[in-house]
Image: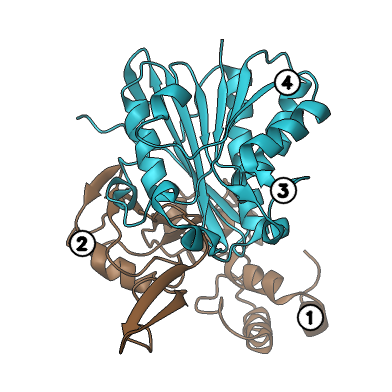
Amino acid sequence: MAKITKEYLEGKTIAELRKMVVHDFGIPGMTKKRKSVIIQAIMKKVNSGKKSVGKGASRSSKSVVQHKPVTDIKMTIESSITNPHKAFGNKATTKIIVACGASKGKFAVAGKTIAQIKVMLGEVLNIPKGFPQAMVNGKKVDDSYVAKKGDQIEILKPAGKKGFEWIIHHINGYVFECPNLIIGHPHPHQ
Amino acid sequence: MMNIKIVGLGGIGSALLEFVGRYLNYSDFTGVITLVDGKDYKQKNSERQFFNQFGNKAQSKEQEIVQRFRNLNVKSFPEYITQKNISTVIENGDIIFVCVDNHITRKLISDYASTLQDVIVISGGNDWIDGNVQIFAKEGGRKIRPSLTDYHPEIEVPDDRSPDTMSCEELAKSEPQLFFANLSAAIIMSWVLYGILTSKEVPKESEIYFDITQLSINAVQRAVPEN
């Protein structure tokens, strides 16, 4: 590794610095900090002469760290991580696949009911208002079902029909037809 | 011999015929393509629909396609599909493209296809910027992909009307649609046909959703309900 100086660190991108601070220096709580703060933390660590190897440094495989010999006896420390998901800096949040129509993603919704998920992800997944049926692992469930690890949730989207939803309003003998872009949304004429 | 029926030749159907017709014309396909629609092409349809002449959609497209794609055997059925005539249009062994704009007709075709032994129904529909394609299939009398109504209560109990029961004024009222959404549905339906013709198998995914503004497609496998 190149000599760690402030100039060297400033030449790095924020993403590179965030990786370095965790993997090379084992400094916690830095992954969301600003560049200047990360550089300051690294320099502090470097200047203190106590650069240590974070747990994440050996995440991918075994790593070998050479320490300066204190005596004439050379010493080698070998470490390996058997559970990479618990490596430093990794959040062990269970994420569940939730889909609605063409929209799909992994979300931290374990422990939430289908009703809560519909509200929480309504805009993200463009879930139609009203009462769309939910399916978990291919089976229909009701809104009180609580999502758990390993579930695959689908909120059934109604089949495409044609253009907008049209609402016909009858007011004082007159007929109004208005496009209703959000299904179930109360229209001003109503 | 496998025959193809295209029901509805509007925004989706007229585009689908362009893609599928061109592909089949240069393939070893020997079946008959039947075009079904009771409506006429009018000036206002030019915005989203492929046609060279006014008049009945099925007949206009038949005349156009036989001249452009001379290897194809194309027929027209210039009527809306109804409970009375469906048995004369849809037959065992057909691949049926449902390109209509109402759930009543989707249900009619799905229910009738459920009575056949071997049939593949590929139905496309779209709203303004998104839509879906459904695949329903029966093989040897066994349902191998869910019907159009199995997972869609809005098709099982449609709240719209069949075009054959609507007045001329009602039919003339065109609801806004996006050309690109029509094209997307047609393209995905043509992918499904290509998959079936080349692999000789119906795709495992029975529903494909698309969304133009999200630039996304999601294909979903669904179990066939037991009853």
Q: Residue at x 39, y 73 (%)?
A: A167
Q: Which quadrant of the view contains residue B215?
A: bottom right
Dot 2 corresponds to which residue? A143
* Residue B54 - label: 3
Relative horizontal placement of residue B93, taking residue A6 as reference (left or right): left
Residue A21 point in image, percent of width and height? 62, 73
Q: Residue at x 38, y 89 (%)?
A: A188
Q: Residue at x 36, y 12 (%)?
A: B140
Q: Which residue lies most toward the top here?
A: B1
Task: Using the image as rendered, state which of residue A131 and residue B34 is in the foreground.
Answer: B34
Q: For residue A112, say whether it is visible.
A: no
Element type at marker 2? loop
Q: Does label 3 lie on the same chain as label 2? A: no
Instruction: Chain letter for mark 4, please.
Output: B
Give the image's coloring scheme. by chain
* Residue B72 - label: 4
Residue A58 point in image, percent of width and height? 56, 54
Q: Does label 2 lie on the same chain as label 1? A: yes
Q: Foreground mark, 2 or 3?
A: 3
- C-alpha span from label 2 to label 3: 50 Å
Decide: few, some or many residues near mark 3? Use Cα within 10 Å; few <14, some 14-19, many ≥20: some
Dot 1 corresponds to which residue? A5
Q: Amino acid at mark 1?
A: Thr
Q: Which chain is cyan?
A: B
- C-alpha span from label 4 to label 2: 51 Å
* Residue B209 - label: none
